[in-house]
Image: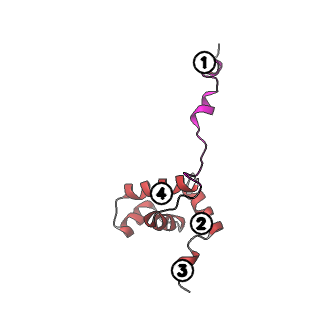
Amino acid sequence: MPVRRAAVNRLGKPPAARCVPPRMPEAPHTPLTVTEIVVAELAAQGKRNEEIADELGVARKTVEWHLSRVYRKLGLRSRTELAGWAARENPWASAEPE
């Protein structure tokens, strides 16, 4: 019996179906923290994690942690999706001076 069929018979689902969780927002209206907003905005502008870390005076790992929280809360998978979301939603428009 092929390995894949054996896994399906034993587990009831193909291995790939079990390994890829759906990407859903953390909660329907989980707000971003102020720091997450700042990090998300800088990342959406195209800045690298190292540049964001230098600008905020934090470690690169801290930036990565905040970005992963942003992705989870917004149901996104990548920086590219974040930039697309920011372009569509224009979430920082109200924060700009008139």
Q: Which residue is mark 1?
A: 10
Q: CA distance from mark 3 to mark 1?
A: 57 Å
Which residue, as the protein is rendered here, is positioned at the far bottom? 98
Amino acid type at image mark 3? Glu
Q: CA distance from mark 2 to mark 1?
A: 44 Å
Asked whether 15 falls inside the magenta stretch, the response is yes
The label nearer to you, 2 versus 1, is 1
Contact (CB < 8 A) between labels 2 and 3?
A: no
Q: Which residue is mark 4?
A: 67
Q: CA distance from mark 2 to mark 4?
A: 14 Å
**Disc with the residue nearer the chain's start (3 vs 1):** 1
Q: Is residue 70 above or below residue 6?
A: below
Q: Which residue is mark 3?
A: 96
**Disc with the residue nearer the chain's start (2 vs 1):** 1
Amino acid type at image mark 1? Arg
Q: Which residue is mark 2?
A: 86
Q: Quick one: SS at disc 3?
A: loop
